[in-house]
Image (cartoon, rainbow, N blue to C red):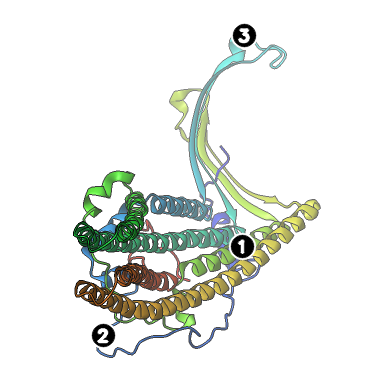
Amino acid sequence: MHKFTHSPLRWPALSLLALALSACAVGPEFVRPTTQTADAFARAETPAVADVAPVDLLEFWRGFDDAQLTALIETALAENHDLKIALARYDQANALLRGARFDQFPTLTANAEAAHALSSADQAPGLTRAQRDGERYSAGISASWELDFFGRIRRGVEASRADAAATAADLQAMQVAVVGEVARTYVELRGLQERLRVAQENAGTQRETLRLVDTRVNAGRGTEFDSARVRAQLEATQARVPALEGAVAVAMHRLAVLTGRPPAALIADFTPQRALPPLPARLDPGTPGDVLRRRPDVAAAEYRLHAATARIGVATADLFPRFTLGGLLGTQAIDSSALFEGDSATHLVALGIDWSFLDLGRVNARIAAADAQAEGELANYRKSVLLALEDTENALVRYAHARREDAHLDRAAIDSAEAARLARLRFDSGAADLLEVLDAERTRLQAQDAFADARTRSIVGAIGVYKALAGGWPGTLPLREPIAGR
């Protein structure tokens, strides 16, 4: 019940003193670390397509023009449990920020008490029992306010604000990761289905070859050796099917869980085979500086460095005294009917000083710990910058090499299919033996399977570039409260 009353002179004077000193905040001011970057990525190989606009980086998946992929990613952004966890962590950090802000203002409490007390004869000598037996009533409004002369509270709010911003960046990074994984898994699913189609189609062709050979053997124009060779190749081709079907099922399960559904939820929707989505017409990585400004993991590291720097100020403020302004405005009486009479009023104004000047060893230890944490966060920031640049360079080189491999295998698949067709015609006309046909069909299967795998890796490579460039999170984040800019 010790809080302030409205004194006509002392209260304004103390308030003006607090405002005059409020600009002082001990500890270092945060300065964003400088980062030297190249003007361009060493591995960038952007095709010159003047009449095609670049794909929107934030929603790059729309550039693949695949309705199922778009629906999957939109569902994942709304239902993925990793994103819900990241959002909950942001909400928690934002709530802690609101709590820290309240420390800048007075704490107001209201209280009331009604008590019946009987004092002992030793406590009140000479009084009768009736005189020692009485009641007591009180009511009041109290307040306390730490005058933040040295910025301890303000540095704490600054640290909490940076923590909240870091968790917002973590949410963005998780969106990038989830979108990238959904897109990659979907493309791999379609690539596996294409490889499955190739295996099944080649198996069908080889069955037809086996039928023709068996017909020749029955007509006395071939041997059982020929049939055995064709059957062996057919069995080898059919052996590819179970492994591919299993991989297709695993990809479906992964997509379902990524979108917040049970593993078997998408089997009916994705069992029908569909072609791989097309490659983007243009993929421009921009400059390393642009990437670092977009990457949410780099932003999160910067915000955490900011928070650690602010906490040095929190620790340093303990070297100085804390001033607390408190007061009470209330009433006390021994009879409830007199509680609000003028003579029952009571008030108190107090200025408290708390200074642990004999505990400087512990304070200096806390400052040293805060300094060390800031140094660690600075190293983590610089590491995040290097990893972001490495990630982008690696993604670019993987994509470029996958595109080159894709182009060669595309031609190889076309030529091997033509060679297999010509070998069959030569065999039917008697100009070639069965071994030539079998070799051409085996080469066609290998080339078509390799091309499907390479095309899948090319598209996955493009997704990897988009992910490295921080593509894949919407422009409007589901944040509960705006955060301070970087």
| Earlier sequence position, callout 3 versus callout 2 | 2
Q: Is mark 3 on a helix, strand or loop?
A: helix
Q: Can you tell which quarter of the image residue 202 is in?
A: bottom left
Q: In this view, does 80 lie above or below 441?
A: above
Choose top left, top right, bottom left or bottom right for residue 225: bottom left
Is residue 280 in view from this perspective? Answer: no
Q: Give amino acid for label 2.
A: Val
Q: Which of 255 and 55 is in front in this view?
A: 255
Residue, disc 2:
52
Return the residue at label 1: 308
Label 1 crowd (10 A; few <14 / some 14-19 / many >=20): many
Mark 2 nearby-residue class (10 Å; few <14, some 14–19, many ≥20): few
Q: In this view, does 108 lie above or below 98?
A: above
Question: Does dot 1 land on a helix, a strand or a loop?
Answer: helix
Where does residue 112 sit, x and y in percent of width and height?
A: 48, 31
Residue at image coords 56%, 16%: 134
Q: Residue at x 40, y 72 (%)?
A: 461
- Disc nearest the viewer among 3 and 1: 1
Q: Distance between the residues labelled 3 and 1?
A: 64 Å
Q: Residue 197 versus residue 432: which sits nearer the camera?
A: 432
